[in-house]
């Protein structure tokens, strides 16, 4: 277990004038990654005090006293204010700098907030203690920790002088009680652990239509007013309102028509008293005119027009800038680009934009029995359903699928395919099959030997064996082999990962409450996801099972539009009970 210390450095915090949010947040995030917090303090921005505390914590021998720490993270005092001295104090303490760590923290921070560049935090080692400065605000702490979580375990392992778990000792790691050494996680715990290691990808400059469904990575300000000029909202006559004073059916006002103006042109002369210009919708209001009267409200007679009523000044005119004002922040970064946002960008005269790029998702099937769909079946063989269903899911949720084919159940074959993926530069690996405890379950062996496993048991059905780890720095989800289990695990794990990489903040699918029309038996306390068809009738949703629920029965997935969620603690369910249903599809006939 990592022994860590958290130090908040803040004059106001130390004086009790401001509540420390960053220190507790840091502790929580460190605990989640399995660290033990052995020291927490709030101290003022005093160089000497900071230096003294860092030195004392780092110099306490490890493994002997209660206080020995191998990781110290500070928060606060990294800015340019005169009292900010955390980096100076830290530099006095550390013996070997780790500049890359500090730069990556700044760089990643900058992708979210440009002000991150003025943080002066440093990182380095004293003896066998790693010291890292993070800025003081909780947002920066959270983002900084997201950068550090994948790096820290390795960095600390090397700092302790331990060999990295490599090919050399992978053999014995694989044997023995490997399966028991990984705990069974709840769906939420597993999702949280996985998402802690997945980060939004970088922005890319490209044509608007390619940005559809992606997240905007720039603040878009209006360079122009929209509309750019006052213009007519109607087809009619541009007039001066004061000319209509006293007009009525019996005493119409007669105005002389001095010209015609279509949208796209400007009128070369002014509308003088007693005159009017025929004007079409969208055409700029000529100088002198202040009102438009619709054709239907006027009577034309050759080159004059009769106005039969008094009109209010400003009628039927769309004002310059009434939609968007020049200089206004129209679309903040982080906005999901739907067709309407794409339209707004176009209206602003933008043909291209910065948007978070799409993740490249490598897809790999495993199994001696699995053959490509374009090959004829042979005895004992089955067609590869998962590569295609998973690729379709990747496309549907905004990723770019890169199918790597099928690896037979041999470590070298799977390793070679994974290497191929790494060479092509992928952001996520999805494998299917080979994660249970059978004799030929190679995914977990390769992951243990060449990467690292973070978990592989999730308390759900289908999909209990579900491996998650990293290989070559790329997250890998080992989905189960049964086609339905592979698809449902994708929904619950790969989908949030892809959406997080795409810079999205929300990844929950809509759930609804439905009346169950079938009784449900159960023999275990896993969370069940049952394939159901939901329909709506008289203000209620009803869900019925679509058939046998075996995790290989793809047909009941084909019939389903939702997954009924049966919580761990629920016993048997009778028909008529209410359940939550995660909607896989949300067709119009279900919404009503
Ligand atoms: P495994 O997790 O490798 O033990 O596979 C579990 C079940 O899923 C076995 O019956 C496999 O034949 C089946 N399976 C594995 N991969 C695929 C695939 N790509 N397409 C269809 N079925 C598969
Ligand atoms: Mg297999």
Image (cartoon, helix red, strand yellow):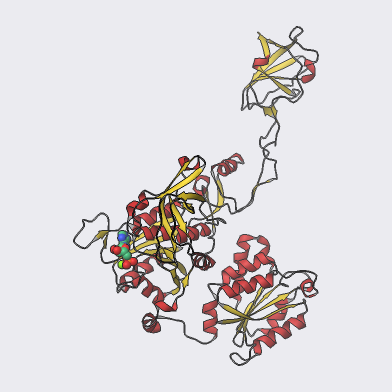
Q: Residue at x 72, y 83 (%)?
A: 51
Q: Residue at x 57, y 73 (%)?
A: 32
State the image coordinates of residue 6 (x, y, percent, origin top left): 66, 77
Q: Is residue 459 left or right of residue 230?
A: left
Where ligand 2 lies, by quadrant? Answer: bottom left
Where is the N terminus found, in terms of image quarters? bottom right
Residue 259 seen in the figure? yes
Q: Residue at x 61, y 66 (%)?
A: 143
Closest to the observer, 385 or 287:
385
In the rendered image of this protein, does residue 280 appear above or below residue 530? above
User: Which of the 4 image quarters holds residue 350?
Assistant: top right
In the rendered image of this protein, does residue 382 appear above or below residue 297? below
User: Which of the 4 image quarters holds residue 112?
Assistant: bottom right
The number of callouts visible is 0
State the image coordinates of residue 110 (x, y, percent, origin top left): 63, 63
In the rendered image of this protein, does residue 544 appear above or below residue 101? above
Residue 471 seen in the figure? no
Q: Residue at x 55, y 84 (%)?
A: 159
State the image coordinates of residue 30 (x, y, percent, origin top left): 60, 74
State the image coordinates of residue 131 (x, y, percent, origin top left): 63, 80
User: Which of the 4 image quarters holds residue 288?
Assistant: top right
Q: Is residue 365 left or right of residue 354?
A: left
From this viewpoint, which residue is outermost toward the left?
379
């Amino acid at each position: 277990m990592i022994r860590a210390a958290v130090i908040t450095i803040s004059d106001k915090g130390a004086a009790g004038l401001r509540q420390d949010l960053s220190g507790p947040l840091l502790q929580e995030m460190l605990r989640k990654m399995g660290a033990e917090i052995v020291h927490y303090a709030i101290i003022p921005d005093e160089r000497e005090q900071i230096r003294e505390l860092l030195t004392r914590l780092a110099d306490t021998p490890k493994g002997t006293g209660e206080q020995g720490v191998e990781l110290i993270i500070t928060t606060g005092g990294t800015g340019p204010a005169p009292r900010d001295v955390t980096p100076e104090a830290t530099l006095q303490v550390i013996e070997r700098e780790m500049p890359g760590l500090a730069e990556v923290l700044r760089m990643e921070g900058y992708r979210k907030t440009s002000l991150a560049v003025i943080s002066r935090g440093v990182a380095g080692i004293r003896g066998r203690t790693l010291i890292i400065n993070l800025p003081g605000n909780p947002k920066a702490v959270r983002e900084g920790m997201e950068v550090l979580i994948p790096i820290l375990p390795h960095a600390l392992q090397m700092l302790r002088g331990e060999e990295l778990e490599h090919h050399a000792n992978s053999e014995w790691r694989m044997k023995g009680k490997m399966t028991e050494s990984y705990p069974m996680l709840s769906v939420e715990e597993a999702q949280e652990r996985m998402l802690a290691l997945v980060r939004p990808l970088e922005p890319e400059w490209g044509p608007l239509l390619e940005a559809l469904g992606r997240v905007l990575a720039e603040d878009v300000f209006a360079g122009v007013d929209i509309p750019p000029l006052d213009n007519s909202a109607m087809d009619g006559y541009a007039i001066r309102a004061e000319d209509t004073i006293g007009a009525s059916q019996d005493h119409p006002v007669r105005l002389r028509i001095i010209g015609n103006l279509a949208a796209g042109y400007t009128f070369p002369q002014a509308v003088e008293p007693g005159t009017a210009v025929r004007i079409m919708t969208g055409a700029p209001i000529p100088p002198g005119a202040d009102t438009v009267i619709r054709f239907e409200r006027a009577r034309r007679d050759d080159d004059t027009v009769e106005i039969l009523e008094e009109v209010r000044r400003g009628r039927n005119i769309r004002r310059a800038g009434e939609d968007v004002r020049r200089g206004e922040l129209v679309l903040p970064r982080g906005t999901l680009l739907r067709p309407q946002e794409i339209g707004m960008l176009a209206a602003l005269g933008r043909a291209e934009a910065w948007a978070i790029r799409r993740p490249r998702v490598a897809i790999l099937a495993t199994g001696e029995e699995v053959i490509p769909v374009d090959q004829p079946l042979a005895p004992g063989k089955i067609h590869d359903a998962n590569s295609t269903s998973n690729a379709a899911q990747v496309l549907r949720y905004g990723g770019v699928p890169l199918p790597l084919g099928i690896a037979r159940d041999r470590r070298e074959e799977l390793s070679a395919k994974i290497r191929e993926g790494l060479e092509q530069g992928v952001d996520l690996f999805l494998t299917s099959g080979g994660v249970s405890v059978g004799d030929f379950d190679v995914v977990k062996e390769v992951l243990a030997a060449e990467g690292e496993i973070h978990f592989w048991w999730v308390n759900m059905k289908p999909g209990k064996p579900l491996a998650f780890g990293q290989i070559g720095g790329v997250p890998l989800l080992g989905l189960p082999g049964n086609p339905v289990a592979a698809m449902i695990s994708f929904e619950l794990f790969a989908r949030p990962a892809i959406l997080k990489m795409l810079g999205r903040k929300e990844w929950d699918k809509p759930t609804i409450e439905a009346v169950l029309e079938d009784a449900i038996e159960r023999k275990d306390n896993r969370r069940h996801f049952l394939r159901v068809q939901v329909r709506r009738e008289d203000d209620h949703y009803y869900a019925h099972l679509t058939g046998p629920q075996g995790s290989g029965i793809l047909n009941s997935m084909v019939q389903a539009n939702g997954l009924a969620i049966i919580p761990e603690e629920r016993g048997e369910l009778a028909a008529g009970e209410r359940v939550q249903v995660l909607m896989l599809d949300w067709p119009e006939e279900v919404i009503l």
